[in-house]
Image (cartoon, rainbow, N blue to C red):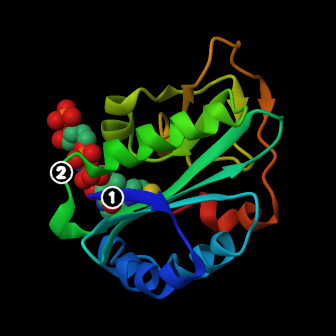
Amino acid sequence: MMIRDATADDLPAQMRLYPLAFPDEDLRPLLCRLASAPDVLSRVALDGPDVVGHLAVTPCLPVGVVLLGPVAIAPRCQRQGLGRRMITDAAALMATRGATQMQVLGDPGYYSRLGFRPDRALAPPYALPRDWDGAWQVMLLTDAPALTGQLQVPAIWADPALWGP
Ligand SMILES: CC(C)(COP(=O)(O)OP(=O)(O)OC[C@H]1O[C@@H](n2cnc3c(N)ncnc32)[C@H](O)[C@@H]1OP(=O)(O)O)[C@@H](O)C(=O)NCCC(=O)NCCS
């Protein structure tokens, strides 16, 4: 499977992918905002002509911090290493662009396998539910020390609904 930067032409296929990967929530409005944001890394995985994976990485503040998400793999391609490949590839790309750490809000059961660990140094932009302990995670991309304080997100992510159940 090939992984490359998403283009505007990929958006309809991404819009079809998301309800398959996320049957219980509609992330398409977020996807549209991410697709038109110039600073966001947006990558697709292709199985022949079919878009079977997508992820986005958004630069935030403090400088050097990027936010991973969403990650969507088509159900028929899950658990075959594609998510790992896309995330590893995105982390390497962001490191070449000066990122020092990548944050994610997600299942630690999955993300811990990829090198993420719970982050208690840099707080998320909104308070998270207590039972999401461990879901706010970081992957260090360089030898730079982990940043402290609170993540500041661009307008795309400045919606508390994206940070709660
Ligand atoms: C979660 C998701 C991104 C994982 O991608 P994937 O391509 O299926 O995962 P991979 O095949 O790369 O799995 C990598 C490792 O994680 C494990 N894994 C995969 N899905 C997992 C899950 N849901 N929970 C725990 N571990 C999981 C795999 O067994 C594998 O472990 P191993 O390397 O030790 O064998 C994908 O299943 C998906 O898109 N799910 C629906 C949408 C979603 O929940 N996105 C994430 C939140 S934004």
C-alpha distance separating marks 1 and 2: 17 Å
Q: Is residue 71 toward the left or the right of residue 52 in the image? A: right
Residue at 73 percent of width and 48 percent of height: 59
Image quadrant in which you'd find residue 104: top right
Mark 2 beta carbon near ligand 1 (under 8 Å): yes
Q: Which of 43 and 130 is in front in this view?
A: 43
Image quadrant in which you'd find residue 35: bottom right
When the figure is inspected, residue 111 is found, relative to residue 154, above or below; the finding is above
Query: Three-letter amino acid code at disc 1?
Result: Met
When the figure is inspected, residue 31 is found, relative to residue 79, above or below; the finding is below
Q: Tags 1 and 2 in contact by the CB under 8 Å rule? A: no
Query: Three-letter amino acid code at disc 2?
Result: Arg
Name which of mark 1 and mark 2 comes first in the sequence. 1
Assess disc 2: are there few (<14), some (14-19) or many (≥20) residues with their C-alpha within 10 Å of its C-alpha.
Answer: few
Give the numbered dot on residue 148: none
Residue at 41 percent of width and 83 percent of height: 13
